[in-house]
Image: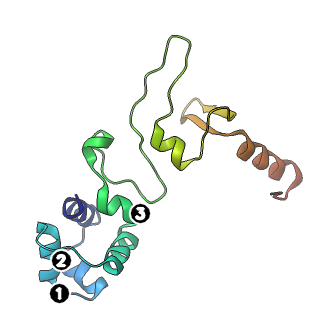
Amino acid sequence: MFHDNLVTLRKMKKMTQEDIAEKIGVSRQSVAKWETGETVPDLYKCKILAEIFEVSLDDLANYESEDSMGMALPPKGKHLFGMVTVGDKGQIVIPAKARKIFEISPGDQLVVLGDERQGLAIMKSESFLALADVVRNGKYVE
């Protein structure tokens, strides 16, 4: 996983092993060993790599494209949770990982927003109402 993600991200950023080595302060051979899976960088170097590629440390280490419909690693804070099927009455099941990350629990109220060109968005009602207060009052109230 890690070594595949490192190769993919480096190529996406059009960087060479030398470029990566220079930014982290290691040899090109070290980067080559990381990319083959022969060795793994220490946690500090992994953190720097995640910052360079603008991905989360967890995604850098654990992301598997097969779990996300073959898509490349998403930028930090962006997620692809997979596909869901719309039921007979329009209901969908929000994937467990999405519920965990966004702290969605049974009984929570959600707002569904739509833009005919960009699609749908779902957010917790408290967040939407806080945003509406900012627009209405010009100030954020927590």
**Residue 6 drawn above or below residue 72:** below
Label 3 crowd bin: few (<14), some (14–19), many (20+), radius 10 Å? many
Tell which circle, 1 or 3, labels the residue nearer the N-terminal end.
1
In terms of secondary structure, where does tag 3 sit? loop
The residue where tag 2 is placed is 31
**Residue 71 drawn above or below residue 63:** above
- The quarter of the picture where the C terminus appears is bottom right
Q: Quadrant of residue 71?
A: top left
Q: Residue at x 17, y 87 (%)?
A: 27
Q: Residue at x 41, y 66 (%)?
A: 54
* Residues at marks 2 and 3, CA–CA distance in whole angstroms: 19 Å
* Residues at marks 1 and 3, CA–CA distance in whole angstroms: 24 Å
The residue where tag 1 is placed is 27
Label 2 crowd bin: few (<14), some (14–19), many (20+), radius 10 Å? many
Q: Residue at x 43, y 28 (%)?
A: 84
Question: The disc labelled 3 sits on which kind of residue?
Answer: Ser
Q: Residue 96 versus residue 136: which sits nearer the camera?
A: 96
* Residues at marks 1 and 2, CA–CA distance in whole angstroms: 7 Å
Relative side of 13 to 58, left or right? left
**Rendered location of residue 34, percent (x, y):** 17, 72
Res. 56 mark: 3
Asked if disc 1 and disc 2 are in contact, CB closer than 8 Å, the reply is yes
Res. 139 mark: none
Question: The disc labelled 2 sits on which kind of residue?
Answer: Val
**Residue 60 drawn above or below residue 137:** below
Tell which circle, 2 or 3, labels the residue nearer the N-terminal end.
2
In terms of secondary structure, where does tag 2 sit? helix
Question: The disc labelled 1 sits on which kind of residue?
Answer: Ser
